[in-house]
Image: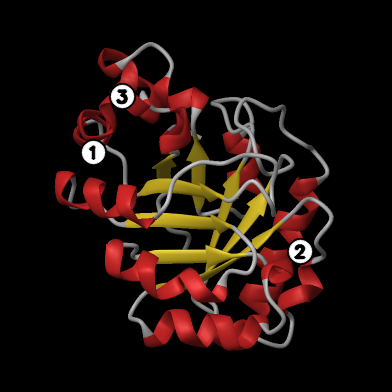
């Protein structure tokens, strides 16, 4: 039986001058997780936040922190983000020499371990380590900036990952990030996604619109 869809608003689209207020408003509006995009200006062409901002945000909400590390090398920072309050830590296979070792370390730290797929990363990248994974994140845009258009090609990847997971009987979330809207979100869910990351689609219209925006995404 499929889970109800999880909505994980991306704080990348929030008002950075009011991050604590924005996080509280998102939780009050019905968000399931809080998605935090961490970029280093090296692995992806943008620079965002570090563990101190995650730590500062953590007391403002009780929902899980879904932290996507778009940084390389990633291993030296796993402990810092876990200590800052990350509940789910998602990394890219390309961000370190030993994905299996990195995933084991995330779990040793007490967080759920996620693997993120760039548009060109094949599903087979995780074929031999599904036992170590709690979440897979399909990037339906090129990571680095919000506001990009959804890539239809990634729907086939969602389907393939769902097949791999279900065939092995694994309890792994399939999450999608990039160009997710009330129009594209239902297509992702139909392809096998469990969780939707949305920035612009959630934060447009300001706090008064957040509840309706989240409801529109969940309606898929």
Q: Residues within 10 Å of mark 2 (few under 14, many from 20)?
A: some
Mark 2–mark 1 contact, CB under 8 Å? no
Kindly state the secondary structure of the residue where label 1 is placed: helix
* The label number, if any, that marks residue 160 in the structure image: 2
Q: CA distance from mark 2 to mark 3?
A: 40 Å
Q: Position of residue 52 (x, y in %)?
A: 31, 53
The answer to whether one can see residue 218 in this image is: yes
Q: Residue at x 27, y 18 (%)?
A: 207
Q: Residues within 10 Å of mark 1 (few under 14, many from 20)?
A: many
Q: CA distance from mark 2 to mark 1?
A: 32 Å
Q: CA distance from mark 3 to mark 1?
A: 18 Å
**Residue at which label 1 appears:** 27
**Residue at which label 3 appears:** 17
Mark 2–mark 3 contact, CB under 8 Å? no
As rendered, which of 81 and 5 lies closer to the eye? Answer: 81
Mark 3–mark 1 contact, CB under 8 Å? no
As rendered, which of 86 and 50 lies closer to the eye? Answer: 50
Q: Residue at x 41, y 43 (%)?
A: 7
Which mark's residue is nearer the viewer, 2 or 1?
Answer: 1
Which mark's residue is nearer the viewer, 3 or 1?
Answer: 3
Q: Mark 2 or mark 1, which has the lower sequence index?
A: 1
Q: Position of residue 143 (x, y in %)?
A: 68, 44
Up the image or down, 22 lies above or below 3; here it is above
Q: Quadrant of residue 159?
A: bottom right
Q: Residues within 10 Å of mark 3 (few under 14, many from 20)?
A: few
Which mark's residue is nearer the viewer, 2 or 3?
Answer: 3
As rendered, which of 1 and 124 lies closer to the eye? Answer: 124
Q: Quadrant of residue 23?
A: top left
Kindly state the secondary structure of the residue where label 3 is placed: helix
Q: Position of residue 92 (x, y in %)?
A: 65, 65
Q: Position of residue 202 (x, y in %)?
A: 42, 26
Left or right of residue 176: residue 98: right
């Amino acid at each position: 039986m499929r889970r109800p869809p999880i909505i994980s608003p991306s704080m990348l689209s929030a008002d950075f001058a009011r991050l604590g207020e924005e996080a509280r408003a998102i939780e009050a509006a019905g968000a399931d997780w809080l998605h935090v995009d961490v970029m280093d200006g090296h692995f992806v062409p943008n620079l965002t936040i570090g563990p101190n901002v995650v730590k500062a945000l953590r007391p403002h909400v009780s929902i899980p922190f879904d932290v996507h590390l778009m940084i390389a090398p990633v291993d030296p920072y796993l402990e810092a983000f876990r200590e800052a309050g990350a509940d789910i830590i998602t990394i890219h296979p390309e961000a370190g020499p030993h994905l299996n070792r990195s995933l084991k370390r995330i779990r040793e730290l007490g967080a759920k371990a996620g693997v993120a797929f760039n548009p060109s990363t094949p599903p087979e990248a995780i074929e031999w380590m599904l036992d170590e994974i709690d979440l897979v994140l399909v990037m339906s845009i090129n990571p680095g900036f919000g506001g990009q258009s959804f890539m239809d090609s990634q729907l086939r990847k969602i389907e393939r990952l769902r097949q791999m997971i279900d065939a092995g009987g694994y309890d792994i979330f399939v999450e999608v990030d990039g160009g997710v809207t009330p129009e594209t979100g239902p297509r992702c869910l139909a392809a096998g996604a469990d969780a939707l990351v949305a920035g612009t689609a959630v934060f447009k219209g300001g706090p008064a619109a957040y509840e309706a925006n989240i409801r529109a995404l969940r309606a898929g």
